[in-house]
Image (cartoon, rainbow, N blue to C red):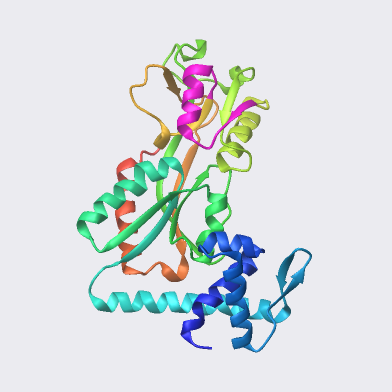
């Protein structure tokens, strides 16, 4: 094989990770038939059968699994070579594909992009809003270069091998009530146990925020919250508090200032923090363009870091 085959090797690796030709096509902007054709060419080049029928789909043969494993090594090596060559050129250029939650995108990724555009005009940044559970596989496969991961105290997030985590900021998490709520009358902390009969809002099941809301209510309030509303959009959760009388727990980065319809209070039973991390693939952390964007992000994180 030659280096011109890296494109086909990437398709094979994608198939090993994603499982179906349709999923590979959706992730790579190919049609399923084009993916199949490229893999057929790869089989001829390898001199071995790499995929075989499995029900209505396909699966990797033993030879396919071996080559997919080595494909990951070759693709990582190619990325490292590109990074080193970019460093020798003296120019910081390239494209960075960044992913984050809504609050991270709005308060960190976008301001860092604006700062970088002025200092490093040859670096292009693409920003996508995506939940961590969906973004991690994309980072491992190389379709994403950087993501912002969140982690609440007591609720660790997955940390797959081969990824580098760098602390970006630590922030408080607050109880958010309607301003007219009886417990919002005073400025002091509010007891969770007094909210066992309240209607709650959170992110969708399976997310870190959902686990934090449920776990905090159980551990410090002694009840399972009535999670009647679920949205991964913090602004939707805030609107449910304003207009529908719901309550929720949200980190500082998502909270507005000067909103007279909301009461933002500390939790009486515990101090709860959220940490945000910049996550990259280990072999790509020294890419000049990526390093420049990370430095801009760290600067933004320092501006928002308020220990709770």
Q: Which quadrant of the figure contains the C terminus?
A: top left
**In percent of the image, x 28 and y 67: which residue is there?**
93
Residue 296 appears in which quarter of the rendering? bottom left
Q: Taking 237 as reference, is 91 above or below it?
A: below
277 sits left or right of 155 in the view: left
**In percent of the image, x 34 and y 26: which residue is there?**
257
Total numbered badges shown on the rendered structure: 0
Q: Taking 303 as reference, is 64 above or below it?
A: below
**In percent of the image, x 62 and y 65: which residue is there?**
17
289 sits left or right of 194 in the view: left
**In percent of the image, x 22 and y 74: which residue is there?**
90
State whether residue 13 appears in this view: no
Check residue 230 for magenta coloring: yes
Residue 145 appears in which quarter of the rendering? bottom left
151 sits left or right of 304 in the view: right
Q: Which quadrant of the figure contains the N terminus?
A: bottom right
State whether residue 27 appears in this view: yes
Q: Nearer the viewer, residue 175 or 219?
A: 175
190 sits left or right of 117 in the view: right
Residue range of the region highlighted in magenta in the rendering: 226-247
Residue 178 horizontal/vertical position (percent): 48, 17
Residue 72 appears in which quarter of the rendering? bottom right
Determine the residue located farthest toward the left in the rendered image. Answer: 118
Check residue 250 for magenta coloring: no
Q: Nearer the viewer, residue 198 or 236?
A: 236
Residue 268 horizontal/vertical position (percent): 52, 24
Residue 115 horizontal/vertical position (percent): 25, 51
Q: Nearer the viewer, residue 196 or 11?
A: 11
Q: Taking 57 as reference, is 208 above or below it?
A: above
């Amino acid at each position: 094989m030659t280096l011109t085959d890296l494109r086909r090797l990437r398709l094979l690796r994608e198939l090993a990770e994603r499982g179906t030709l349709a999923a590979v096509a959706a992730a790579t902007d190919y049609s399923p038939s084009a993916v199949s054709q490229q893999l057929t060419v790869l089989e001829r080049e390898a001199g071995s059968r790499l995929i075989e029928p499995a029900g209505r789909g396909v699966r990797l043969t033993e030879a396919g699994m071996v080559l997919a494993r080595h494909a990951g090594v070759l693709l990582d090596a190619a990325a490292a070579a590109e990074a080193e060559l970019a460093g020798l050129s003296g120019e910081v250029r390239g494209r960075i594909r960044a992913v984050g939650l809504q609050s991270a995108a709005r308060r960190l990724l976008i301001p860092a992009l604006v700062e970088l555009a002025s200092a490093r005009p040859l670096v292009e940044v693409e920003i996508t809003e995506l939940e961590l559970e969906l973004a991690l596989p994309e980072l491992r496969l190389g379709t994403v270069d950087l993501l912002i991961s969140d982690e609440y105290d007591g609720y660790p997030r997955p940390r797959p091998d081969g990824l580098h985590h760098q602390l970006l900021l630590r922030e408080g998490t607050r109880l958010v009530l309607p301003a007219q709520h009886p417990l919002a009358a005073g400025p002091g902390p509010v007891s969770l146990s007094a909210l066992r009969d309240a209607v709650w809002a959170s992110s969708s099941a399976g997310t870190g925020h959902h686990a934090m809301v449920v776990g905090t209510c159980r551990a410090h309030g002694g009840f399972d919250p009535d999670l009647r509303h679920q949205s991964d959009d913090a602004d939707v959760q805030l609107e449910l508090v304003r207009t529908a009388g719901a309550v929720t727990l949200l980190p500082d980065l998502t909270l507005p200032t000067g909103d007279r319809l909301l009461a933002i209070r500390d939790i009486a039973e515990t101090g709860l923090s959220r940490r945000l991390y910049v996550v990259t693939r280990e072999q790509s952390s020294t890419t000049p363009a990526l390093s420049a964007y990370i430095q801009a992000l760290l600067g933004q994180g320092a501006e928002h870091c308020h220990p709770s």
